[in-house]
Amino acid sequence: MIRQLLVVALLAAPQAPNGIRKEFARLGVDTALVLPSSALDEFPIWSPDSRYVAANVMGTWNRVDLHEITLAPGTWHGGERIGVVEARAIVEPLEQSLVHRWKPEVEPDPAVAESRSIRIEFRQEELRSSLVVTRRGKAPVVKWTSGLEECGSPVLSPDGSLVAFLCLTNGLFVMNLK
């Protein structure tokens, strides 16, 4: 009986989407541009199960299915290797009823997202942004600094394994935190 309950609990626990995890591992990267667009508004939102991430593109919310994503190799900001969404078919409009359900009650901080174990912070200097990751008990690490691009609006996935953020001239990114 206890074993059955444990199996049920493990199956019900939210987990990061396998598709994007496999793609990160396949390409040897931890960051992906999942929705290219220079017309993003607001902040990213997540489905409760962390399968979808969505962004507002010129007034229309679009969701990206991270279970079905395929990434191609790409480079960004001085040669940093990233994944880039290969097929736009996994991007679909998000129903307004889901937008209201997925949005947090309080608007996220435009520069910081944190849980008990990690802090994701964007530091702005003129038109550049630096992504700083601080894990509990460790020194802050600057992951990268953008060229002439403002980035921010980090939002942790409900399962805490991914963070979505926006870079204004490129689009919606997802970074693996595990």
Image: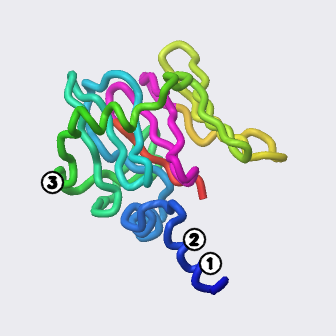
Q: How many numbered marks appear?
A: 3
- Give the image quarter of residue 125: top right
Q: Nearer the viewer, residue 138 or 62?
A: 62
**Mark 1 Cα-neighbour bin, 10 Å: few <14, some 14–19, many ≥20:** few
Provide the residue designation for mark 2. 9
Q: Measured from the top left, where is residue 150 in percent x and y?
A: 45, 22
Q: Amino acid at mark 3?
A: Ala
Image point 48% across, 60% down: which residue? 16
Q: Which colour assignment does the render follow?
A: rainbow
Residue 102 point in image, percent of width and height:
39, 38
Residue 154: give x, y in percent of width and height.
51, 33
Q: Does dot 2 land on a helix, a strand or a loop? A: helix
Looking at the rendering, the stretch of residues picked out in magenta corresponds to 146-171
Q: Hey, what amino acid is under mark 1?
A: Leu
Residue with the mark numbered 1: 6
Numbered label attached to residue 89: 3
Q: Disc 1 to disc 3, how far (Cα)?
A: 36 Å
Which residue is depicted at the point 42% across and 67% down?
Answer: 18
Q: From this viewpoint, which residue is outermost toward the front?
A: 1
Q: Nearer the viewer, residue 11 or 128?
A: 11
Instruction: Find residue 12 and report its horizontal and vertical position in percent.
Output: 50, 67
Instruction: Please give left or right for residue 130 compared with residue 65 in the image.
Output: right
Residue 141 seen anywhere in this rendered image of the structure: no
Callouts 1 and 2 close, C-beta under 8 Å: yes
Residue reaching furthest to the top = 126
